[in-house]
Image: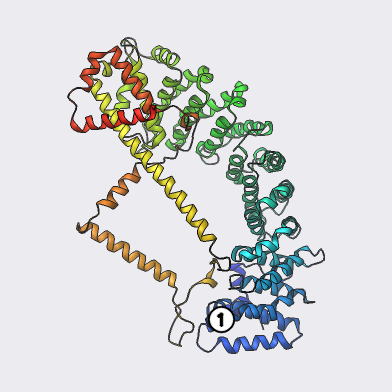
Amino acid sequence: MLNSPSIAHGFASNIFEDLHNPAAGAGALLRGLAKRKDIVQPVLAFTIQILQQSSDPCEVEGALRMIGELNHQLTKSKKYKKDVERMLDALIISRLRDPSKFVRARAAWCLKEYSDAHFHTKSIIVKVVDGLIQIMCDANEELPVKVESALAIQSFLEDQERAHAVVKPHVRTLVLQILEIVSKAQIDDVISVVDELLEQFVDEVIPVAAEVAEHLSNLFLEILTSDTIDDRTPALNSIIPTLGSILDLVEDHREVMVHVEASVLKPINCILTAGHIEFYDDVIILLQSLLQTYVSEPMWAVYNELYKVFKTTDRQSILPFSDIAHVLHMYIVTDNESFLAFPERMNAMIDMCQVTLQEDDSGDENHLYAAKILETIILECGTHAAEVIPTIIVTVLRRLMKPSEEGLSELRPLLFLVIVAALYTCTELSLNYIHQIAEPNQNPLDYICEELVELNKKFEGIHNRRLALFGICVLFLLPSSARPTLINTNPRKVLEASLAIFDNLQRALKTQAQNRKDESGSEESEAESDDEGDTVAKPKKGARHRKVQSEHLSDDEDEIDEMSLDYIDAMAKECKRIGGESDGNGDDDGDSDSAIESSFFEETDTEQFATKFDDDDGPDVFVFFKQTMEQFENREPELFAGMVGNLSPETAESLQNLIKRSEADMS
């Protein structure tokens, strides 16, 4: 007979222990035999007889284990699946109240294995889940029984919609009970159950979110400062994502968020001050959740600590700038007023960017993010950043003098866009400083203008193209004596580069709109799909849910995984499609055009660093360009006429389309 579970660890699966566990081997043998013809029926009859007649806990526990191992055959076979719920009701559910703790734990495990069965009778689901909840609420119940019951509840929540109503009134008790299990018994597997409860019962969790966060934070600190930290690393790694889930839940509830934040900041401060570098990535994730809607004073204290860590840590291997860039961006844009209220905050931000850009061994990826943060400062702070703009400009120009790594094409265009942002935001100040540091008798704008024209095809994404066009417009609006030579001598070249950027911008905007429409339609379809009957079992992960070709196998047949067949079939179709394209046969124009169109969205790594410049009510580049051209025509009619006269048909068409779009935006 299969052995009883260990009271210390319940039935938690461990692949390394299973290698030397005879019970695991027996279970694998039973599953293998069950795939053969005429095996399931006698095994099932044998186990049912034991459950009906035996009072020996070891025999009963073993029979329950065998029933659980047969879940795949019984739930998928036409012969047995209609009777599964009756079997559970008659033989398994009552065992949750068995005098033996081993039997109670195994019964909960067995029910979990059948959570994805077809239940036609709601009362049986209610009876199962209610029995599991009673175990969780029993202060005198053994830990292994509670662990298996918690995992079974999670499975029923995932697979049976009708289980939700039964669990709903008990969410708070369940969450706190599970946290107590993790804390006292060092059984970390059940933290995933908390995640499931957080996901399924948002309204019920929010009132107790602060209490749950406090439990998790204290648990994290207890483990972090204990002598057994190495043994509890999995628990630490699972606690932080759960804290992140709580933060996401209460994001729109400021009064709750304040209390949750206080709890979450305790492990964050401990990790940063004590130098637990292995959890720095987790801290970054939590900070991003904390900075979504506001920045509290304690969070500004974390900002100061983060700055200290950055200055004193190995920035290349432990805390690279690219890891903290998103957090720094959120400090700037979430509460810009508080960011500007204390100059030391701005100075620390500029210093981190400067240090990164000046270190050659930081790598271009970190340089890219540092440049993006400098651009964010200018665009979000506007004229309030006037004092630091000279520092930003000289830092960027020094980096432009150095070579860039191959393969990162976005860095050089972005460095120029930082200067463009300064010219657009504080034109006079930026011009004066650029001329101060330029060589005598040279117009430094010549260099900037020529690079913008040459880089017109290198600007990717919506934001970068918009900003580049604003920069070109600013150059057109300058007095003749200050304008770049290229605009005064060959404005058509600048116009053609601008039109190329506009064309790509419009394609990117079109693709973005289509993607959003598709995503919206997909979400609606998923919602409709979710509403189609709550008795349909959802597929679960794991080998026990693989599909089989037939109900039974003869002795010379093996079970075939249909998912593998589906994959092979899909690969064959893909190879055939690629082969057809390479042969030049078939009409591929539609697919090709679609691929090209999609490539023009190019949501770059830095595209998500949005500022008020990117808001829907931000400046309209189409309107600004039209107004710029009208002013340029009034000031320089001859130059303007030469610029737009005798254009090629393609250029003329692009200009006409741009004018129509600009007029539409203006109206």
Q: Residues within 10 Å of mark 1 (few under 14, many from 20)?
A: few
Residue 121 lies, in percent from the top left, at 64, 74
Left or right placement of residue 469 versus residue 283 in this view: left
Left or right placement of residue 478 versus residue 353 in this view: left
Residue ID at (57%, 79%): 81
In this view, 230 is above or below 32: above
Image quarter (top left, top right, bottom left or bottom right) of the C terminus = top left
Colouring convention used in this rendered image of the protein: rainbow
Residue 437 is at least partly visible in this image? yes
Residue 115 lies, in percent from the top left, at 61, 70
Q: Nearer the viewer, residue 454 or 98?
A: 98
Residue 455 is at least partly visible in this image? no
Left or right placement of residue 465 versus residue 391 in this view: left
**Name of the residue lying farthest toward the right:** 140
The amino acid type of the residue labelled 1 equals Leu
**Name of the residue lying farthest toward the front:** 667
Total number of numbered discs in the rendering: 1
Q: Quadrant of residue 289?
A: top right
Residue 153 lies, in percent from the top left, at 67, 65
Left or right placement of residue 529 versus residue 652 in this view: right
Residue ID at (39%, 37%): 461
In this view, 561 is above or below 460: below
In this view, 39 is above or below 399: below
Image quarter (top left, top right, bottom left or bottom right) of the N terminus = bottom right
Q: Nearer the viewer, residue 321 or 74?
A: 74
Residue 63 lies, in percent from the top left, at 67, 82
Q: Nearer the viewer, residue 183 or 40?
A: 40
The residue that label 1 is drawn on is: 29
Residue ID at (18%, 30%): 648
In this view, 354 is above or below 275: above
